[in-house]
């Protein structure tokens, strides 16, 4: 049962941010503290980076609304050696309880609501099965990392120059690349990392997770749990007069739900860093356009697709689904999907993964959804997610179903598609060239890595 302070502060966190003043509001400080607690928790315990490393890179250049606040907030990291749980605490106001993020093995980190008195593990009724992450390392690439050393390309010098340029600023002033991998014909032909990163260092995928969600929907369809053209069947929309019941899974995957959201794009601060949950926050938004009539890039649509999967699969199957049905099957052993404190995956953004694991993900699509002779995605799924339908975004790239389309990019084959994420996360798939390109970054706000130019230059170097 919630305490009075817990109820009051849950309402505070769920409220829209106040208009920006010269001095940050209590809400701004609360979100900034949640951002810091969660990022430190995941970066330390998922990725193995140090607090100092994270504060110098991952916590620099974030949303301007919070960027200046973070250095003023002191974090406390608690972890007992040999324990499979840990926490990070960040105070932000003398009169309000601190923000806390809890970590548990193979579940990653979750930011808690302010004032929560519960222990993190008590809130999880189901958990993903434990798997030692290093077990697969002895397997040959791409199943594992044995013999994964780079196989030089035919034009190795030109490719090396292009990849090295990505580690600098050749493709964007101020861009901060942390990793690049180029895979051709299933072999790693180029791989380079920023100091402090490496093959087994994970980062937050941000919106690359949306393409992971699209993949999980495909697996769910292959297993008969759902069909993309069916109504999403969100439990919170069961009232007879609720018009949102007409929204289909396909419309959610194509960002065409018609649902209102506080801001367009990838700002879901209350859910990501504020301690609210999917069922509290995401299911509450009303329609402000008819489903299927408007493209509006929104985290909510993708999170709702996963909410529909939970309703269809049941809690126990759902809790293990990303790891059991995708990550473990294709060797993504250092990928962790995180949840809110009610166990809902926040699979619009909150996944931690390595560059190599994302290269494996790209290979799954390059191989038409087949891995090691086993069909993981239904036949025709790759065509489905890469075919535009209905309203399209303005600008350089088109949109399929959780994947961006690069058919209009100069020097890039028309069949190229990609997963994009905040701070410069990219997984580019070029079927006609049998190439997968992964670029990871921690680009500060305002800096843009030119993924289309990088892709074109990599492909030119391979000719």
Image (cartoon, grey):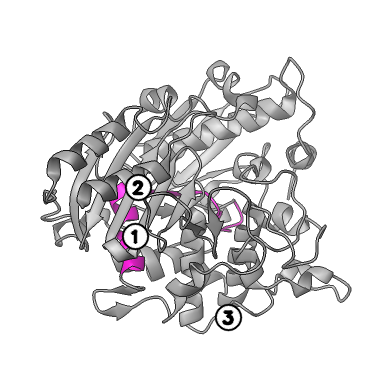
In the shown orientation, is residue 239 left or right of residue 211? Answer: right
Residue 227 is marked as 3
Residue at the image point whose x is 38% and y is 35% from the top: 44
Q: Secondary structure at mark 1?
A: strand
Toward which corner of the image does residue 445 lie, by quadrant?
Answer: top right
Residue 355: image tag: none
Which one is earlier in the sequence, the residue at label 1 or at label 2?
1
Q: Secondary structure at mark 3?
A: loop
Does residue 346 show up magenta in the picture?
yes
Q: Residue at the location (51% across, 79% down)?
A: 221
200 sits left or right of 420 in the view: left
Q: Nearer the viewer, residue 354 or 291?
A: 291
Q: CA distance from mark 1 to mark 2?
A: 9 Å
Residue 302 position by quadrant: bottom right
Instruction: Kindly report the distance in space between the C-alpha atoms of the residues bearing marks 2 and 3.
Output: 33 Å
Foreground mark, 2 or 3, reads 2
Q: Is residue 200 above or below residue 324?
A: above
2 or 3: tag closer to the N-terminus: 3
Residue 415 lies left or right of residue 462; in this view the side is right
Q: Mark 1 — residue? A: 430
Residue identifier under label 2: 455
- Mark 2 Cα-neighbour bin, 10 Å: few <14, some 14–19, many ≥20: many
Look at the numbered discs 1 and 2 and tell me whether their residues touch, using CB distance below 8 Å. yes
Q: Which residues are magenta?
A: 341-366
């Amino acid at each position: 049962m919630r305490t009075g302070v817990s109820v009051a502060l849950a309402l505070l966190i769920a409220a829209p941010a106040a208009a920006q003043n010269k001095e940050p509001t209590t809400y701004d400080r609360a979100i900034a503290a949640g951002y810091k607690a969660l990022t430190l928790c995941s970066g330390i315990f998922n990725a193995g980076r140090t607090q100092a490393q994270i504060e110098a890179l991952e916590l620099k250049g974030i949303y301007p609304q919070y960027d200046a606040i973070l250095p003023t907030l002191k974090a406390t990291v608690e972890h007992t050696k040999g324990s499979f749980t840990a926490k990070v605490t960040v105070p932000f106001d003398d009169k309000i309880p601190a923000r806390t993020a809890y970590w548990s093995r193979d579940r990653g980190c979750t930011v808690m609501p302010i004032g929560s008195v519960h222990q993190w593990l008590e809130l999880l009724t189901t958990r993903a099965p434990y798997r030692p992450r290093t077990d697969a390392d002895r397997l040959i690439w791409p199943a594992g990392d044995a013999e994964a050393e780079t196989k030089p390309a035919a034009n190795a010098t030109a490719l090396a120059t292009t990849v090295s340029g990505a580690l600098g600023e050749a493709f964007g002033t101020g861009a901060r690349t942390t990793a690049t991998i180029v895979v051709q014909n299933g072999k790693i032909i180029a791989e380079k990392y920023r100091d402090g990163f490496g093959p087994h260092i994970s980062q937050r995928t941000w919106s690359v997770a949306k393409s992971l969600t699209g993949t999980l929907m495909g697996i769910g369809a292959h297993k008969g749990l759902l069909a993309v053209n069916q109504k999403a069947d969100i439990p919170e929309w069961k009232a007879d007069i609720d018009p949102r019941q007409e929204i289909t899974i396909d419309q959610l995957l194509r960002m065409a739900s018609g649902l209102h959201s506080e801001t367009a794009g990838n700002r879901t601060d209350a859910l990501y860093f504020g301690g609210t949950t999917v069922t509290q926050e995401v299911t509450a938004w009303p329609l402000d356009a008819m489903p299927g009539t408007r493209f509006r890039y929104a985290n909510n649509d993708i999170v709702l697709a996963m909410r529909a999967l939970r309703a269809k699969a049941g809690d126990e199957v759902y809790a293990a689904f990303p790891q059991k049905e995708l990550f473990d099957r294709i060797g993504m052993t250092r990928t962790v999907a995180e949840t809110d404190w009610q166990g809902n995956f926040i699979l619009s953004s909150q996944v931690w993964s390595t560059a190599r694991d994302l290269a494996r993900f790209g290979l799954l699509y390059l191989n038409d959804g087949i891995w090691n002779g086993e069909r993981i995605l239904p036949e025709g799924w790759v065509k489905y997610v890469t075919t535009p339908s209905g309203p399209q975004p303005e600008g350089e790239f088109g949109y399929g179903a959780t994947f961006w389309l690069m058919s209009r990019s100069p020097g890039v084959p028309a069949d190229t598609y990609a997963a994009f994420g905040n701070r410069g996360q990219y997984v580019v798939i070029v079927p006609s060239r049998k190439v997968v390109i992964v670029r990871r970054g921690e680009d500060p706000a305002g800096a843009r890595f030119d993924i289309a130019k990088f892709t074109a230059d990599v492909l030119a170097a391979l000719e």
